[in-house]
Amino acid sequence: MKLTWFGHSAFQLDDGEHTILIDPFITGNPLATVDPDSLEADTILLTHAHNDHVGDTIDIARRTGATVIATHEIATWLGQQGIENAVGANFGGTVRFPGGSAKLTPAWHTSSYLLDDGTWAAPGLPVGFVIRFGGKTTYAAGDTAVFLDMQLIGEEGLDVALLPIGDHFTMGPNDALRAIRMLQPGVVVPCHYNTFPLIRQDAQQFRERVEDETATRVVVIEPGATIDLADL
């Protein structure tokens, strides 16, 4: 299974037959190296409603017919935007999709969408996802602080964790290290950093510290690059 990072928290998982997009923030993402019109998806996983995570979800879903999995409130709002295949769920629930499944986990953050007229829409709570797909179990944490129940998420048996390290809006490197000790994933891919000045971080320094202090391997991906999880 191949994992591509588009910068910020936008990822693609591809098992050769099915494609998942996670928080496809491409337009307006200064790190993105692709045109959103070039992306295909069977499933889109949306962790929360902030504009830098919803991103191009609506346009991609309309064009591809992808199923969008999100919390109930966000899925209802997406349906009002013309997304026919928006599936709402909630914490602890598992939603199956072509090739795999996604279990919704808590995340400590906020969630709302800023409209062009300056008003807020899409209320609801943020989530993470435990994704079983392509023979791997991947935890997409979304935007979150560290929290003690990550111990329970770690009991899912995580091969890969996609963790924010940017600080200011999410946990920073120190708390991400605390999260890794609870999650105990085989591999961590850091995200949600260096998109904007407020979340500048040294991912290589983070990698060195994690690998010095834990048994987890950190793989730093350049925006637009793809890794094969079967090789890890």
Image: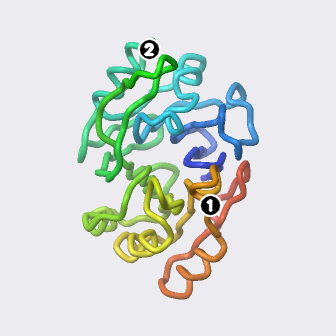
Q: Position of residue 183 (x, y in %)?
A: 37, 69
The residue positioned 41% from the left and 64% from the top of the image is 158
Three-letter residue code for mark 1: Arg
Mark 2 nearby-residue class (10 Å; few <14, some 14–19, many ≥20): few
Q: Are marks 2 and 1 in contact (CB under 8 Å)?
A: no
How far across and how far down the image is residue 156, in percent? 32, 62
Q: Residue at x 35, y 49 (%)?
A: 109
The answer to whether residue 77 is seen in the rendering is: yes
Which label lies toward us, 2 or 1? 1
Which disc number belongs to residue 81? 2
> Which residue is at the far front?
118
Categorize mark 1 by other alpha carbons within 10 Å: few (<14), some (14-19), many (20+).
Answer: some
Q: Check disc 1 and report the residue beneath it.
A: 200
**Res. 18 visible in picture:** no
The residue lying at 36 percent from left, 38 percent from top is: 111
- Residue 146 location, quadrant: bottom left
Between residue 124 and residue 41, name the one nearer to us. Answer: 124
Where's the C terminus, which quadrant?
bottom right
- Tell me where residue 172 appears, x and y as whole percent: 48, 66
User: In terms of secondary structure, where does tag 1 sit?
Assistant: loop
Q: Nearer the viewer, residue 227 or 218?
A: 218
Tag 1 or tag 2, which sits nearer the N-term? 2
Corner quadrant of residue 79: top left
Query: Residue, x 32% and y 46% (percent of image)?
Result: 104
Amino acid type indicated by mark 2:
Gln
